[in-house]
Image: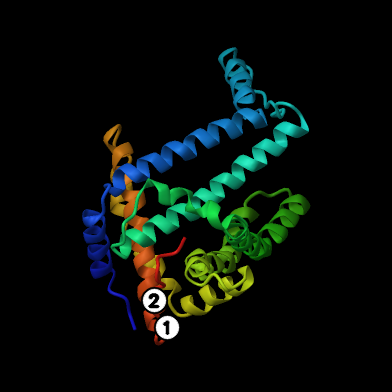
Amino acid sequence: MRIDRRQLKQQARTAMGNARPRPYWVCLAYMVILTLLEILSMSLSGSIEAYKQMFMSARMGVVAYVEPTPVGGMMGWILDVALQIMTAVMAVGFVIYALRVWRHVHASVGDLFDGFGVFFRAVWIQLLPSLLIGLWSMLYAFPAAMLVVMTRQSWWMIALLPLLAPAVMASYSYRLAAYVMLDRPELGGFQCVAVSRDMMRGHRWELFKLDMSFIGWGLLCAIPIVGLFLAIWLYVYMQVTEAGYYETLARQTMPGWTPPEPPPV
């Protein structure tokens, strides 16, 4: 059964309008946290210092690549990885928040940190789909790299782009794995990915069209200053709509399915 994306998006806006505190401010807090984590990560990895050196070289008319040097050696690298893991867990926390907003359950900034309550599962459900998609992308990356090296013709990178189709399809197949993990804690990572794949069978194009329906809003985000604030609203709008898509699809593909009580933590 086809999911009416206009109705879905209207329901998402209604849910956002009823949520307190306003989802905009929660999303703003989330973005600030992610930005701080990214700045710390770039500082520890040495990327900021490397960019400064390249910028100063460019001002003097010299184009040179500077290899980032992790601050503190191995310890700096470990801390950088820890920050990346925290970012992944926070992403699951935002999924929890979006689900609660969609389900008209009290949602707050504290939900962003609920991913740490399922820390290892949250990290795994973020990492596993990425690994699987990466394997599918090798169907493009390996032959493209080989042909570029053998022929010294970079146009192979463009000519073989159709080989990325399996990786793109896989990204849509595994898109709902985090939602499945939260609603069905008894399942392991591979099982959640498998359930997501089964749910999305025959619905990948539908979800793709839903994504494309936000392009107009995305173009408006290019407006200076105003676009920044709009982008924050758009992000939470898309996430709540995706949460609604998951729940609607779950009802259609799994007879008798009902949202868990209490909401996922």
Q: Amino acid at mark 1?
A: Thr
Residue at (30% x, 33% y) in the render:
224
Q: Amino acid at mark 2?
A: Leu
Tag 1's secondary structure?
helix
Q: Quadrant of residue 25?
A: top left
Between 251 and 133, the one nearer to me in the picture: 251
- Outermost residue, front side: 262
Residue 89's x, y, as percent?
54, 51
**Quadrant including the N terminus:** bottom left
Residue at (63% x, 19% y) in the render:
53
Callout count: 2
Q: Quadrant of residue 254?
A: bottom left
Residue at (50% x, 48% y) in the render:
90
Name the colouring of the figure: rainbow
Q: Disc 2 marks which residue?
A: 249
Disc 1 to disc 2: CB gap under 8 Å: yes
Residue 212 visible in image: no
Sort mark 2 into few (<14), some (14-19) or many (20+) by Cα contacts within 10 Å: some
Tag of residue 253:
1
Residue 227's x, y, as percent?
30, 39
Residue at (32% x, 76% y) in the render:
3
Residue 260's x, y, as percent?
41, 72
Q: What is the C-alpha distance between the residues marked 1 and 2?
A: 6 Å
Residue 238's x, y, as percent?
35, 56
